[in-house]
Amino acid sequence: MNRKIILNLAISLDGYIACDDGGFDWIVGDGDSKLDTKNKWDYGKFLEGIDIVVMGKNCYDQKFHNDFKDKKVYVATSKDIQNHGNIHFINGNIVKIIEEERKNEGKDIFLFGGGGLVDSFIKADVIDEYIIGIIPTILGKGRPLFLGNNPHINLHLEEYLTDSGVVILRYSKR
């Protein structure tokens, strides 16, 4: 079985993954636990099943790669940047490169974000799992998850969790 490409991120109720300036301090629950499910989302356990993280240059510039020092990190960029340490800069078709990585032995691949990067994977229809945390906030504007003109992709709900007003939905491709 090939390793999976898993999109895992949080969105506002109106579909944004970040503020216009890239801010994400709004990604919190509402503090009310009365609807919480017994099972909780375990990000640490999720990361144990991952050995490659894919992110866009904006995420890299925000230093998110520092959270993944023990993983191979691919960064999509339009510039020609020298690889260093565990960081691999890709100026070109990152979807094709990750599709090649998927064929190798290893753990799953974490599609971290942002929107432009994720869009190329959605349009190529190569995401195996979508883990979306819906934050109880309407941002009104920002960076959207879905950029439009996507293929029709049928999904199957595998799991749902609620934690302090955040609903986490885990879908697989049907």
Image (cartoon, rainbow, N blue to C red):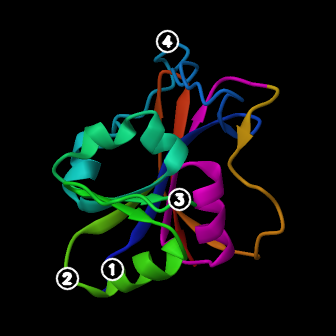
Give above or below for 64 relative to 164.
below
Sequence-wise first label, 4 or 2: 4
Image quadrant assignment for residue 64 = top left
Which dot, 1 or 2, sits closer to the camera? Answer: 1
Q: Which element type, helix, strand or loop, lies under badge 2?
A: loop
Q: Amino acid at mark 2?
A: Glu
Q: Residue at x 30, y 60 (%)?
A: 83
Q: Residue at x 73, y 54 (%)?
A: 146
Q: Amino acid at mark 1?
A: Glu
14 and 52: which one is in front? 52
Point out the stretch of residues depicted in magenta. Answer: 113-139
Sequence-wise first label, 2 or 3: 3
Sequence-wise first label, 1 or 3: 3
Q: Are marks 2 and 3 in contact (CB under 8 Å)?
A: no
The reply to whether the magenta stretch includes residue 163 is no
| Residue 132 visible somewhere in the drawing | no
Residue 4 drawn at (x, y percent): 37, 73
| Residue 155 visible somewhere in the drawing | yes
Image quadrant assignment for residue 163 = top left
Q: Which mark is residue 101?
A: 1
Measure how far apart labels 4 and 1 are at the Cα level.
40 Å
Residue placed under numbered mark 2 in the picture: 105
Which dot, 4 or 3, sits closer to the camera? Answer: 3
Q: Which mark is residue 31?
A: 4
Assign the C terminus to one quadrant of the image: bottom right
Which dot, 4 or 1, sits closer to the camera? Answer: 1
Measure how far apart labels 4 and 3 are at the Cα level.
42 Å
